[in-house]
Image (spheres, rainbow, N blue to C red):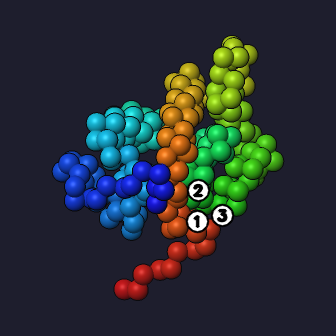
Amino acid sequence: MSTRYPLPELNSLPEDIKAKILAVQEKAGFIPNVFLGLARRPAEWRAFFAYHDALMEPESVGRTSKLSKGDREMIVTTTSSANGCLYCVVAHGALLRIYEKKPLVTDQVATNYRKADITPRQKAMLDFAMKVCQRSHELGEEDFAPLHAHGFDDEDIWDIAAITAFFGLSNRIASFSSMMPNPEFYLMGRVPREKKAG
């Protein structure tokens, strides 16, 4: 729960936002705190999630991307760790474990992605993302060559950079507002899900 700014009541929200939050709850089984935490400002909520969805679910806006869902969540988790964002590391780390089907990967990339059990392609992707995160003003043509060597094109590189930059914004909002991860995120993807009877 956000400790600095009270979360609005779901029923007090505009209908379009309420409907989207209920859809998330139906899928996840709970409402991630970010959805309510940002809903205190409906116009910003709509803008935030429109850009979030365009980057993280490009098919929702009719665009294709060579970055897998796991790649995207790996960028978010790694750069959120560099930014010290507890909420985003825990929440997106849960999604990373699920998409990559690797229970240990989040702890590895959040601590030191260079030693993580990931592919050389993913390491090159994270090298670039971390430079965008920490020293974007130093980026030059030489930073693009390793990505091209691993099969990323310039649109893929835009995705890597834009995801990193967008979550820099998200990390800072979550941190200054003291947004805390939902307890449900901590175990997701770490242990096999119980099969439903029937």
- Residue 47 at x, y = what percent? 34, 34
Secondary structure beneath disc 3?
A: loop
Q: Nearer the viewer, residue 78 or 104?
A: 78
Q: Is residue 181 above or below residue 115?
A: below
Give neighbour class at mark 2: few <14, some 14-19, many 20+ (Cα, 10 Å): many
Give neighbour class at mark 3: few <14, some 14-19, many 20+ (Cα, 10 Å): some
- Residue 90 circle label: 2
Relative to residue 74, is residue 69 drawn left or right? Answer: left
Which residue lies under the disc numbered 3? 103
Q: Nearer the viewer, residue 83 or 112?
A: 83
Q: Is residue 196 above or below residue 69?
A: below
Mark 2 vs mark 3: which is more N-terminal? 2
Q: Quadrant of residue 129?
A: top right
Relative to residue 198, is residue 165 drawn left or right? Answer: right
The residue depicted at 50 percent of the width and 79 percent of the height is 194
Task: Identify the residue at the far bottom of this view.
Answer: 197
Q: Amino acid at mark 2?
A: Val
Q: Quadrant of residue 128?
A: top right
The residue depicted at 53 percent of the width and 43 percent of the height is 176
Q: CA distance from mark 2 to mark 3?
A: 13 Å
- Residue 100 at x, y = what percent? 60, 55
Secondary structure beneath disc 1?
A: helix
Q: Nearer the viewer, mark 2 or mark 3?
A: 2
Q: Amino acid at mark 3?
A: Pro
Q: Are marks 3 and 1 in contact (CB under 8 Å)?
A: no
Q: Is residue 6 above or below residue 197?
A: above
- The quarter of the rendered structure image containing the C terminus is bottom left
Mark 1 vs mark 2: which is more N-terminal? 2
The residue depicted at 38 percent of the width and 46 percent of the height is 38
Q: Amino acid at mark 1?
A: Tyr
Which residue lies under the disc numbered 1? 186
